[in-house]
Amino acid sequence: MNNKQPVVYILASQKYGTLYVGVTSDLIKRVWQHRNNQVEGFTQKYAVHNLVWYEQHESMESAIMREKAIKNWKRDWKIKRIEEKNPDWYDLYSGLF
């Protein structure tokens, strides 16, 4: 995976647990920050550290637009999106290296 690629991602606390949708240009670094509680706020408070879905984009602008759209989705839609590519909710972080 290219470290400097715009990406929209979903983190989960566990299977069917609390979800977080984010956007970044460096997925490996950003997920590491979440996992190590370097990002204060929601993911730290609710222990939302497992990378369960991500989608690469050509530009940061398109990634931000997609992130905003996904944040407005119903929870069931987010779960369906995760399970289309990751039905067992594996933590995808280690596969990024």
Image (tube, helix red, strand yellow):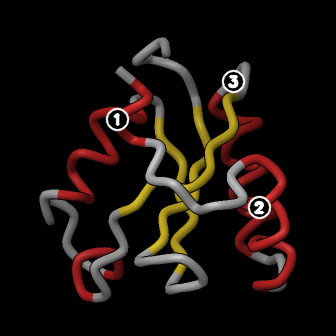
Q: Is residue 87 above or below residue 79?
A: above
Instruction: Give the residue type at disc 2.
Output: Glu
Crowd tier of the residue under label 2, counting other residues whose Cα lies within 10 Å: few below 14, some 14–19, many 20 or above: some
The mark nearer the N terminus, 3 or 2, is 3
C-alpha span from label 3 to label 2: 25 Å
Q: Which residue is mark 3?
A: 59
| Residue at position x 34%, y 35% in the image | 94
Q: Which residue is mark 2?
A: 83
Give the residue at the far front of this rendering. 88
Q: Nearer the viewer, mark 3 or mark 2?
A: 2
Residue 14 place in picture, x, y as percent: 45, 77
Q: Nearer the viewer, mark 1 or mark 3?
A: 1
Residue 56 place in picture, x, y as percent: 67, 29
**Left or right side of 30 for 18:** right
Q: Which mark is residue 94?
A: 1
The quarter of the picture where residue 42 lies is bottom left
Residue 59 place in picture, x, y as percent: 69, 24
